[in-house]
Structures are given as C-alpha cells and as structure tokens.
Amino acid sequence: METTTKSTSQKSQTSATLNHCDGVFHFGNVDWWYHNRGHSSVRMATRIAKRVPTVWINSIGMRIPVPGKTEIAWSRYWRKINSLTKGLRRDSESGMYIYSPLFVPIYSPFFLKFNGWLLSLQVKILCWRLKIKHPSAIVSMPTFTPAVERRKWRKLVFERCDDFTTLPEANKDQIWVLEKRLLEISDAAVYVHEGLMKREIGLVKESVLVGHGVDFDQFVAARPIKGARVPIPESMRDLPKPIIGFYGGLDEFRMDGELMIKIARHIHPATLLLIGPKQMDLSRILAEKNVKHINQLSPKDLATHAAHFDIGIIPFIQNEFNRMCNPIKLKEYLALGYPTVVMKLPAFQPYQSMIYTANSYDEFLAQIDKALKENDSSIIEKRRAAVAGSSWDKVAERVAKLLAVP
C-alpha cells in the first residue's frame, strides 16, 4: 500500500514539474535603464524573479523618434544606445536578469519580421546561457510579437497595460495587427483596465482583470494619521509650501504640459514638484520659478518623497490613449490619504467620491483650491480603506499562476 502511495505521489510530482516553467522572459514596455521602474510590469517581474529565473527584455519601442517632431528625439537615441551597451546584467536586489536586445529601430513589416528572427535568436542564446529549458513568456509590447511567435513557451501571456494603437506617431493599423496576433497565440491576456478587457473578450483564450497593487503598509507608514511622517528628503527641505506633487513617467502623450504651466502660475509661490524621468521637453514648465524636478526614484524612495506632498495630482491629457490607462499612482496617493486632483478619465470613476476630478483647466485649478482647504480627517481612512486590499504580491501571484511558475 505504501509503495503504491509513494509511486502515485512521485508521478504527481513529475507531472507537476512537466507542467511548470523553469524560467520567465518578460518582454517589457519600458527600458530598465532609463524608464520609470514603478510600472506594473516591473512590480510583477521583480516578484516573480524571486521564485524562478526571470529575464527582463528591455523595450524595443514602436515608433522612430523624429527630430523636430518627436520631443527630445536626440536624447531618446542616445539613451537607447547607452542601454544597448549594457547587454545582459543582473539586478542585485531582485535577482532579475536585465537584457538590452539588439534590433533595428525601423518598424516596417520587413524589419518587424527581421527583428523577430533576430530577437528569437537572442532568446535562444539566453536560454542556453542561463540553462532555461522550459520558459514561459509575458509580453507587454506588441512589437515583440514576431519574436515570441517563433519560439515554444510553456505558457504565453499578453499583458494588456495600454491600448498602443492610440499611441501618437505609431502606425495604428500595423500595431493592431500585432496586438491581434498576440491575443490569438497567447494562453491568456491580463488587463488593468476593464473597458479594454471587455472590448477584447473572445479574441484570446482567457481574459483576466488583475488591476494594480499597492505597497499599502509602506505608504501608510510614511504618512501616519497620528505621529510624525518619515523625515523629509534633503531635496525637498527648502521647497515653499504647500507642495503640489506628481510622480511617474513624464511622457508627452500622457502629461498635459500647458496644464502644468497653468498650475505652477496658479499656486505660486507654492511648489509644483515633478518626480520622474524626463521623457518629454520640460523646458517651458521648468522655466516657472516654483517648479522643481527630481529625477527617477526607486519605488521604495517614492513613498518617503510623496508623503510630503500636500496634494497629489494627475494632470493627464484627456486623449484616446489615456482613456484606456489606469495609473498606479492613484492607489498610492489614496494609501497616503491626502487629496488628489485629476483630469477626469474612466479609470478614476470608482474613486470619484474620494478624489477631486476636473474636465477643464479652470476646473482643475479650482479643485486644487478646494483640496487645499480640505479639513475632513475621516476621508483619509475612507481613501485608505478603498485600497487596503490591493497588493502587488497578490497581482504577481495571479500572473505567476497563468505563467505556470512553480
């Protein structure tokens, strides 16, 4: 009887092993070396890396920066060249491997196919070098489609974090062909925006709404209701109060530059603080004397800086691209408890009773004035309760299960 039980158990373990992957390739939509590392893709990947060897493949983009048309075009060329020189490296904190792939930055059908062959070859070499025999893959950017469809994966997951067909300067029809193909070949697609998921039901085998997590305890501890906040960082100590703050990727297709200038002039001499990598031309905004910029911070350092905002803002353009976005920072602002002023977008609707929304520049400025006068302490607990159940560990666990991570 014992022999039979042991044999059955061994067969079960062997079957489970055969169904699991022994490594994960995350084809990212940001470049580890210069983009915002607070992105949901990074939050998931760094957690999965603690369970199985994980390789982050830096973004290969979807459009060619054109000097005179694309903001900071030459800077974009230089930072990508600098990234390419790094090759394969390992992040000491997460243990995740970071790889900058070689590719031709041309997005015609011919070069998409050529890059697919070239990237597939590089993945094969990485598998050999890292001794990964049965990898799974999660893909965040559609231009990776020609590469991933060339290889065999234990599981293939499409991370639908944005609708890239609406990205300015990208070829909408071509991007949709790549996205649709990736939906067809994937085992599942994970979404952060319910509207995008509903639009694509039936185009993929399994659709899963994972949303975003939040490092709740970390943000709450940085700004407790009773007791002192974390010490103010040196870079913020001399800033005139109140501080109206934003952090995240400063992209020209997300951020409303004209609105930020109006905010700076409206709140003067108070401070408009922007934290994040420059991915757009900020010269006109930084020309305002009360605007301060701090470059990219690690996710851990964000809480200690953001804890000293008096108001959090999300001054996004109300464009087609942003209508399908779901900014991570909203849940983090809510965990910190302070007032948040946003341009009205679908993703903010579930929280509109706890935040200040606007549909125009004048409304946004008026909502800032209203938020600065807020004196209802009970709403802090309401905001925190709304996001207390969110967790990046839970999000990563759901994705890991889809990827057959042991």
Image (spheres, helix red, strand yellow):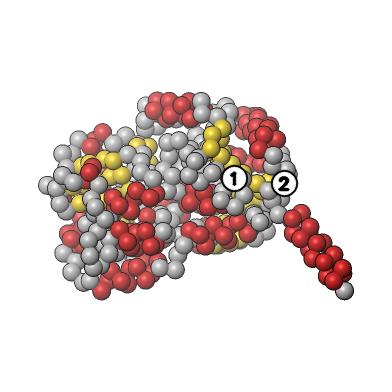
Q: Quadrant of the C terminus?
A: bottom right
Give 328 or 384, whichever is nearer the viewer.
384
**Quadrant of res 19:** bottom right
Q: Is 81 located above or below residue 341 in the figure?
A: above
- Find residue 365 and report its horizontal and vertical position in percent: 20, 55
Under circle 1, the secondary element is strand
- Find residue 206 and report its horizontal and vertical position in percent: 64, 60
Q: Quadrant of the N terminus?
A: bottom right
Disc sitting over residue 54 in the figure: 1
Disc sitting over residue 134 in the figure: 2
Q: In screen coordinates, is 160 left or right of 149?
A: left
Report the residue at 63% width, 41% height from top: 145
Report the residue at 20% width, 51% height from top: 243
Report the residue at 48% width, 58% height from top: 392
Q: In screen coordinates, is 292 left or right of 58?
A: left
Q: In screen coordinates, is 67 left or right of 84?
A: left
- Label 1–label 2 contact, CB within 8 A: no
- Find residue 43 and report its horizontal and vertical position in percent: 48, 51
Give 184 or 227, whichever is nearer the viewer.
227
Please say whether residue 71 is visible from this viewpoint. Answer: yes
